[in-house]
Image (cartoon, grey):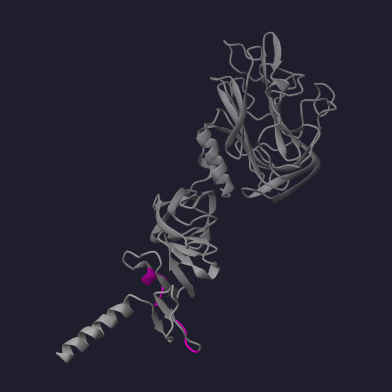
């Protein structure tokens, strides 16, 4: 009977101890604790494992603690992921859960999904990619030049996530040359040459200081108070060459705080109008870019220029003087609108008045055939249709510069208004150096 009473008393005391505070190394555990570990000569040793073993823990619960032997840090699970305590426990390690597509050539746009991806650096098999969209759960990037088949990694200040599967880099390169290539009628690469690629035509007049420098795609041409004027280019010296519309695109670095308008590119028909037949000039107030596009339609009643009516001033597009920017101007005959794009994004548009191109007419260029002995249809960089440098036209005005200062690369003229997607493709591929 005494044994029964003693046993009952022992288990009663044990139960009380279990549901009260437990102390190891102390007889007086803290009243607010469940477990109080006290020592002046030994430390608490949590479970030790690498990242792979940690990620294999089945259904982790918030509050779990491990020592990660991969990162050499204490990590705490807080319900949505493992916190790295070496960074103060303020950020989660990144993860990659999927990416699409799973393969493609250099220049392919890839979307990565996961967690804790903010400000991540993305690499394709150790080659750094250009990131265009970055949120905590999604990244849009471009397969970089030089990438090979392998895993994708996303690295933040807290660690690196590696994709479970590989991205396969296929043959071929998505370059700017593949965008609307059947509509490209003139192209200036400026890769150690001033030649217009589609015709093989070189400039006959070159003034000011010019030098080849590192470009956005290969080399570029740096103008310092300079002009280039080309002889007639056959594909442009055609009355109907741009009748359905056109697109002019180029990569540029341009100085800030330019008071006057400076001509970038123009087709000069020797018709007496300062804006020539088609052209794009610019002005920058601080870093804000003003688009100065124009076109001139010539019919039986004379020359009709959009002039200042097509300018887009005070736009939302801006860039610093040493920064590359992708400038695009389009004209769509179907809508009778001139549109302007900066870095692949539409900035604004201007409608062409019926007084310039009547409703029943199409935009036509004056050619050497339609105006023999007078029209020259010469392309210029850094020159408006003034006298000088041309034989007809008004004298240079006080609001204009008669030359160009800046860096120009990969100038393209298409015989249609490119779509927003095509312009975005040019920008994305050019940004990757392609």
**Location of residue 389 with respect to 370 vertically, above or below:** below
Tell me the quarter of the picture where residue 81 sits: bottom left
**Location of residue 45 with respect to 134 vertically, above or below:** below
Identify the residue at image location x=55%, y=67%: 88
Identify the residue at image location x=73%, y=24%: 275
Of 112 and 426, nearer the camera is 112
In the picture provided, is 322 more to the left or to the right than 173?
right
What x and y, as percent, mark residue 60? 35, 65
In the picture provided, is 138 more to the left or to the right than 356?
left
Magenta stretch, residue numbers:
41-54
What x and y, as percent, mark residue 351? 62, 20
Tell me the quarter of the picture where residue 302 sits: top right
Tell me the quarter of the picture where residue 227 sits: top right
**Is residue 373 visible to the viewer in this orientation of the structure?**
yes
Of 86 and 39, nearer the camera is 39
**Location of residue 114 with respect to 195 vertically, above or below:** below
Pick out the residue farthest to the left. Answer: 1
């Amino acid at each position: 009977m005494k044994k029964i009473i003693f046993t009952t008393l022992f288990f009663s005391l044990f139960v009380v101890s279990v549901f009260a505070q437990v102390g190891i190394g102390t007889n007086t555990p803290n009243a607010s604790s469940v477990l109080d570990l006290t020592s002046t000569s030994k430390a608490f040793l949590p479970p030790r494992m690498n990242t792979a073993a940690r990620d294999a823990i089945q259904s982790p619960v918030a509050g779990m603690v491990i020592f990660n032997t991969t990162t050499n840090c204490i990590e705490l699970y807080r319900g949505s992921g493992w916190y790295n305590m070496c960074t103060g426990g303020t950020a989660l390690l990144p993860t990659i859960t999927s990416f699409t597509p799973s393969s493609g050539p250099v220049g392919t746009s890839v979307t990565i999904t996961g967690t804790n991806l903010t400000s991540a650096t993305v690499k394709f098999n150790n080659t750094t990619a250009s990131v265009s969209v970055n949120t905590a759960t999604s990244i849009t990037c471009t397969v970089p030049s030089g990438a090979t088949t392998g895993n994708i990694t996303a690295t933040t200040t807290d660690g690196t996530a590696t994709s479970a599967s590989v991205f396969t880099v296929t043959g071929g390169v998505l370059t700017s040359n593949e965008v609307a290539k059947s509509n490209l009628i003139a192209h200036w690469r400026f890769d150690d040459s001033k030649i217009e690629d589609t015709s093989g035509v070189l400039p006959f007049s070159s003034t000011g200081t010019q030098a080849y420098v590192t470009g956005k795609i290969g080399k570029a041409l740096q103008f310092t108070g300079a002009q280039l004027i080309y002889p007639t280019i056959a594909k442009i010296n055609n009355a109907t060459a741009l009748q359905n519309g056109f697109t002019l695109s180029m990569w540029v670095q341009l100085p800030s705080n330019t008071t006057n308008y400076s001509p970038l590119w123009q087709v000069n028909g020797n018709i007496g109008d300062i804006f020539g037949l088609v052209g794009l000039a610019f002005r920058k107030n601080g870093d804000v870019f003003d688009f100065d596009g124009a076109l001139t339609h010539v019919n039986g009643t004379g020359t009709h220029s959009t002039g200042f009516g097509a300018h887009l001033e005070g736009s939302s597009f801006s860039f610093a003087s040493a920064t590359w920017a992708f400038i695009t101007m389009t004209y769509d005959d179907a809508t009778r609108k001139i549109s302007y794009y900066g870095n692949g994004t539409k900035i604004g548009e201007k409608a062409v008045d019926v007084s310039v191109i009547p409703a029943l007419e199409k935009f036509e260029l004056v050619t050497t055939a339609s105006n023999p002995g007078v029209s020259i249809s010469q392309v210029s960089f850094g020159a408006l249709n003034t006298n000088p440098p041309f034989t007809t036209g008004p004298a240079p005005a006080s609001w204009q510069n008669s030359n160009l200062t800046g860096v120009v690369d990969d100038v393209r003229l298409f015989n249609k208004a490119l779509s927003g997607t095509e312009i975005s493709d040019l920008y994305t591929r050019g940004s990757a150096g392609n």
